[in-house]
Amino acid sequence: MLHNPSMNSNTKNHAMVLQQLQSLLPSECLITDGPGLRPYETDGLTVIREMPWVVVLPETESQVVAIMRICREQGVSVIARGAGTGLSGGARPHNDGVVLGLSKMNKILHIDVDNRVARVQPGVRNLAISQAAQPHGMYYAPDPSSQIACSIGGNVAENAGGVHCLKYGLTVHNVLGVRVLTSDGDVMEIGGALYDNPGLDMLALLCGSEGMLGIVTEVTVALLPEPEKKSVILAGFRQVTDAGNAVASIIGAGIIPAGMEMMDKLAVEAAEQFAHAGYPLDAAAILIIELDGAAAELDAVTHQVIGHLQACGAYQIDQADDAQTQARLWKGRKSAFPAVGRLSPDYICMDGTIPRHKLAQVLTQIDTLSKAYDLAVANVFHAADGNLHPLILFDANVPGQTDHAMAMGSEILRCCVAAGGTVTGEHGVGVEKLDTMCVQFTAEELDQFFRIKDAMDPSGILNPGKGIPTLTRCGELGGMHVHKGRLPFPELERF
Amino acid sequence: MSGDLSSQFTEVVKNAYAAEQGLVICGHGSKGAWLPEIDLNNTQRLDVTRHSGIQAYQPEELVITARAGTALDEINRVLAAEDQMLACDPPRFQSVKADVMVGDNAGGTLGGVVATGLSGPGRPWSGAVRDAILGVELVNGKGEYLKFGGQVMKNVAGYDVSRLQAGAWGNLGVLASISIRVHPRWQEQVTLVFQMSAEQAQKKCLRLAQQNLPLQGTCWQGGVLYLRLAGHASGVAGAKLALGGETMQQTVDGSFWSDLRDHRVDFFQPKDDVQKIWRLVVPSAAPLPGAWLSSEDLLIEWGGGLRWLRHADEAAVKAHAKSVGGWCWAKGEQMPIDAVQGRYMNELKRAFDPKNIFRSAMSLQHAD
């Protein structure tokens, strides 16, 4: 099954699969009609759509196990889906596959205060975990911007990040255990309320595997004590490079902020119009910095950070200790995407990550690309961890402009790889970045990924065609990463 | 002596692949005592210690990239000069075999740190070795030189092959280069000392873990609880005031935690041939061992999540670990691998090493 891009399952099995699903599931857990299927034709990457063949919404793990058995036996692919907020098309359906929606498995099973973990079903919303832990003075740290809607199962699949990653890590750092169902029908309990586990770290492998290695049916997450106090600082700069230097200066001084966000002029203008957060409209870039921790040290660290901002040329600095002002300072950043959405009929959000010291170089390259493609770009940037979110503005109603914007996005990601970064920091590859994966990885590396997939999912039914591009696809693109002048796998046909 | 031997590694592995000959990957051998015996018939030793040297380090990027044979001591020295440290604070053990001693730098290599995945006393608060890994370059069992991850904090391109190497004990490939996250060095460190029973200590640690405190280590042994507070000076001072207790003398403070981490404290010295030292990883709030264990034979770290037991009755220790939802492992033994998970782990090994060239002493086969 190596290198099989998609399960080309035989339609003759469909009637049998449907019949078995109907006898397994109550009618409200099975969607087969057109209007009912419509919401599932896309995830958060709305430029790519395809109607699913059928959607199942199991309520129990045993139903998931039975669905998997039916699909395996009939060779039908299974596309796991959480809340459908993913931004790379990881949950894009197949017209002959089963979409396995896990939204009904949404129970918080146990908040274990003493061991500081929560055991939850995959459909539980990210924010709901923190809300359930809040009475105990604890919370779940990773906070992707969609946290109000996105599910923890989807977070595991994408190894979701957020604005607090430098200090608190990604999903992989905060998930301690999973129950996972393989396509072969094995249910494994990996990890738990434990700090390490024997053997290969399959938990790390599953985080970010985009539903291609297994289906998570339960998640154990770490809970942290809520910070005693927070401090939020807004700083305006006349030069983008000054803002970049301030980031390096703060981190170089041994300070790890809870969050450190950068926005460029266009993003600031859009956000300010939308949210009235009080951002300086004449700034070339702003930084929003959140510090948290014990009250005893927070004042001292805040003072230190302000010193670095001033030394790096910040001309406006606002600092807030109270929750209301902090919320206002954050509001602009948190509404940046919808705000930019008002500037233009459509936009796509890129997700490259670069070493922080390459920021000025990559932003200059993005500016050049923006002019060359004649498409505006607003930059929102998780500055603390080098994760860029350039928003490319375009109009899908103009013929060819969607492809034009996607092509520009690919070029931005190539710049990120060339700067020593990666094509995706937190949104995942899905279908969106399959082509740019060819830039980042050699044929041998892609082949290694396929072997991993084959080890975990030998029948190849889990979310086929996502995440890892085939060698044929890379060959066709001409973007094949040729190592030391040798074309790998010369025996393979490329057409 | 340092240099880039990666092309030599790929040649050695390619030849071994062609000849179906086993390779035993060796670093300093500092964790040799932890490994079970291995059949060395028809195997060749692949020494990685001369594949060393720091390849990239910019302190404000919070990451260091070094060849896998680079000595842990060297990494620590370079980081300390920039007021940084490895957050996972991996143990530095002594080499046990004379033939793998390499000058003064025999306290383990960076590759060994990753391959064994053993973390120091700060694990619950500063993360494990696997948490700190950002990228690896490795030679797989076919002799292919592969790069995964990178030097950036966030990276979800492809499966996380980098973190999969932590605790893989060399089963999947020859680690060649590693990018690992670093952390600012603590401005201040204080150790508080409290006289109390193991039960009282456990309760106290569970309560403190729910508060905003700069905790970076806990250790209970012999009726004494030690708490390490570390981080920003003002935060440490505030916590010290709030918690009370006696303060350990500054001169012994630093070495107390490194002696504990490196198993130089008395507890870890072999007493007799009968009692093994068991490493139990359990939920922090799990019940303590009952009357069957003398409290002198118990040492508790990680706020309750890591317990060291000295005991002769293997069955009793294993039954206890299982009953409290954890697992246990003794020096020189195979780790317990679940039957179903073991099957997938072996498939994953085959995915990297189809001809089983890499003969790790730490097996992935199912064992209780």
Image: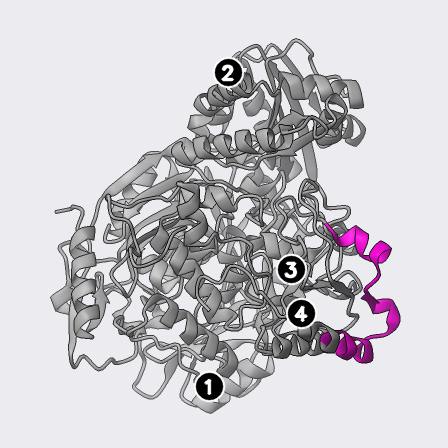
Residue A242 circle label: 2
Q: Is residue B9 left or right of residue B297?
A: left
Residue A38 magenta-drawn?
Answer: yes
- The local secondary structure at tag 3 comes to strand
Question: Which segment did they paint magenta?
Answer: A17-41
Residue at position x 31%, y 66% from top? B170
For mark 3, what is the residue? A221
Q: Quadrant of residue B199?
A: bottom right
SS assignment for the magenta stretch, majority: helix
Are the two marked residues, 4 and 1, in contact with CB atoms closer than 8 angstroms? Answer: no
> Marks 2/4: CA distance?
59 Å
Q: Is tag 3's residue or tag 4's residue first in the polypeptide sequence?
A: 4
Q: Position of residue B239 (x, y in %)?
A: 60, 44
> Marks 2/3: CA distance?
38 Å
Residue B368 circle label: 1
Query: Is B192 drawn above or below residue A459 in the view shown?
Result: above
- The local secondary structure at tag 2 comes to helix
Task: Check the residue under mark 3 and report the chain it is in.
Answer: A
